Image (cartoon, grey):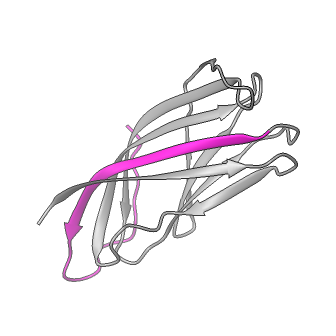
Amino acid sequence: MDTCFQTEEVINIDIGTESNEVLVRNIPDDKLFAIEFIGINGFTTKGIDIYIALDVDTLIYPITVSGSVPFNDPTYSWRIFGSQQVRIYVQPGQKINIHAYRKDINFAARTLVALSGVLFDVEEPVSPSTVAIE
């Protein structure tokens, strides 16, 4: 049975740290997850870009952040955001890591990454992961 599914992860990058990553933990191990959309909300300091990538079983997929606006917070004065339609198939049992990176380590950064798509029941493993960015 097909089931719509969404999960979110927060990645914090502390002052003095260049990058961080999190493992997406709540995807059922016995389902194929077809990721269809990725949404990003990041909080940083003006002029500091955050780079996001998904790592699915050693295949890396960079994600584009398309917008930015001022944000009224003393720690995070700038909000970056974007969404991207993708087609990434995560086989049962495969892990998804989300990586966040920025060049300037003098400021903290926080990013929320949302993955949405469809969970599929599978009886046998299917062909290797493929991706089509649309």
* Name of the residue lying farthest toward the bottom: 124
Left or right, 131 with respect to 112, comes to left
Residue 57 percent location from the top left of the image: 52, 70
Q: Residue at position x 74%, y 26% from top?
A: 74
Name which residue lies at 11% across and 66% down: 1
In-image side of 67 versus 49 (left or right): left
Rendering coords of residue 35 (x, y %): 35, 53
Q: Position of residue 133 (x, y in %)?
A: 41, 42
Vertical placement of residue 28 versus 115, above or below: below
Taking the magenta stretch, the answer to whether it contains residue 120 is yes
Counting every numbered tag in the picture gives 0
Q: Which residues are magenta?
A: 108-134
Q: Nearer the viewer, residue 94 or 22?
A: 22
Query: Does the magenta portion include 111?
Result: yes
94 sits left or right of 54 in the view: left
**Front-lying residue, 13 or 127:** 13
Q: Residue at x 84, y 45 (%)?
A: 15
